[in-house]
Amino acid sequence: MGMSECNAFLTQLDAWIDGDRPAAVDAHVRACARCRDLAQDLGAIREVARGWGAEEFEPPARVWTSLRTQLEKEGLIRDHRRGWARRWTDWLEEAMAGVPRPAMAGAYLIALVAVSIALVGPNSKQLNDSRWIESTQFSTTPLSAQLNTAEQSMVSSLSGDSVVMTSLHDNLAIVDNYIALCEKSVRDDPQNEVARDYLFGAYQQKADLLAQITERGDNSR
Amino acid sequence: MSTQPTLQAHGCVKTAGLLVAGLLLCGAASAEPDRLQRHFKVDAHPVVTIHNPNGIVTVRAWTKREVMVTANRASDQVEVLAEQTGNRVDISTRQTSSTVAPEDLRADYEISVPEDAELQIHDDSGAVKVNNVLGDMNVETVGAGVDLADTAGYLTVKTVGGGFSCLRCAGRLVVSSISGSLRLLELRSYNVQAQTSTGNILFNGEFLPNGIYRLKNYSGLIEVRFSAADSFDLSATSLKGKVNNEAQLTPPNHPGHFESRYGNSLFGTFNDGHAKVELTSFDGTINIRKRD
């Protein structure tokens, strides 16, 4: 097979893959293994590339933001945003006009971050709070129920009037009181790990105390 | 080797069986009415366990390689058991009838042990006092106060309502209580974990290099006294209470130092930050004071 025929085929390769296949070129491809393989490979690559194109993906928001900023800078589009956000940034720019530029940049940034947190924060915080409450309740509710059941079954053990039983009874009341206080703190601020730590610690103390009461009840029998 | 004499002076004349046991006992112990004494030869690092529902337990170290138990009973409603198994001596108080008035259950002990003895003490009410014992120690009480002096080793103390005091203790100390106050004085411990719910905590000791000191309560006062030569990283947090500080702190030296975002908090380094001090309270006050 001559090199000149192969070179001629390369110039018509795209058209051939697209389906434009004159009889002479088709005869060459059938006869020339190199050109046939090349055409098949390129055809397969195109097919795969078409599949990729079908999966549309959204460019990151920052791409649109950069584009918009660039277009605004070049005067090709204008900012048509209106409403409180635009008014607020206009007001902020006016307010910052008298402040030296580096300080303004920092203050502006801080103010924007603060407003972002103020706007986004509550929703996000509420969501997180509910998740924390849920997970805390998930771990403490069965524990609390078990401890309360154990405590109720020990009422008879606590009926003794000895100094020891009185002390155990008094301290159980102290721990119960702390459990209530800690539960309230966790409800008020579910993400507060110190309050949660204290709550779990109080449950542990109650469990220890009930174990001691049980031990003494068993020993006295 | 196992011996199980019953230290029961009043029981010596009641029955023939008891007479035999009593004779054996009286031969082994110098017995006065309600005051009983026993001696046990032991090897190095003996273990001594004491289980006493009510009374004062006093343990002192001495130079002899033996354990001496002296018991004083409030009544014959209780018996004192002392048993040696190998290098372990078990001492306990048992009531002899089911209807005993609480005051009649009382037994006081004075026990002398080698200074390397390991102690395990249970004493519900009364008091526990230990002096100069350098072995590991575990003390559990309900209402009984615990006073340790010049002790060392791994010390674990747990009380429900009893107070705790530790004078010149060394080694490692883990103490917890619900309503008892904790006093750690002239301490030379490298690791201290002290926790109480409603009690106060006073720490007046040395912060050893690389030592870790964690003090925690729910309410009440935590007071730490430091000297100008001390060197520590400090973290103090009271969720709902105050933190008062007299230490000139610099920003924390060590990254990753625990810092709480909640409540009233204080973080910083005093001198080079060789020890680590963590103070935590739920709604109590934390004072960091300069030692006089």
Image (tube, coloured by chain):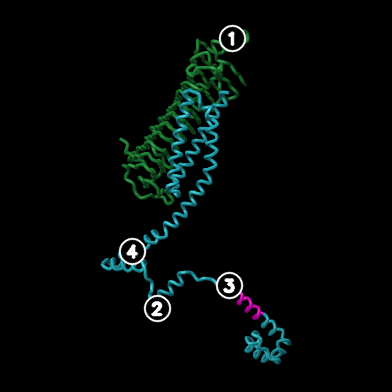
Q: Is residue B228 left or right of residue A8?
A: left
Q: CA distance from mark 3 to mark 2?
A: 30 Å
Q: CA distance from mark 1 to mark 3?
A: 99 Å
Badge 1 and badge 3 both on one subunit? no
Q: Which residue is mark 1?
A: B23
Q: CA distance from mark 1 to mark 4?
A: 93 Å
Rendering colour (chain A): cyan
Closer mark to the observer between disc 4 and disc 2: 2
Answer with mark 4 or mark 2, whichever residue precedes in sequence: 2
Q: Which residues are magenta?
A: A41-53
Query: Is residue B122 a member of the stretch shown in magenta?
Result: no
Residue type, label 2:
Ile
For this orientation, the residue located farthest to the right is: A31
Residue type, label 4:
Gly
Badge 1 and badge 2 both on one subunit? no
Chain to which the residue tagged by mark 4 belongs:
A
Chain to which the residue tagged by mark 3 belongs:
A
Residue type, label 3:
Glu
Which quarter of the figure is the C terminus of chain A placed in?
top right
Residue B181 spot, x, y in % from top left: 40, 32
Q: Which residue is mark 2?
A: A77
Closer mark to the observer between disc 1 and disc 3: 3
Q: CA distance from mark 4 to mark 2?
A: 28 Å
Q: CA distance from mark 3 to mark 4?
A: 41 Å
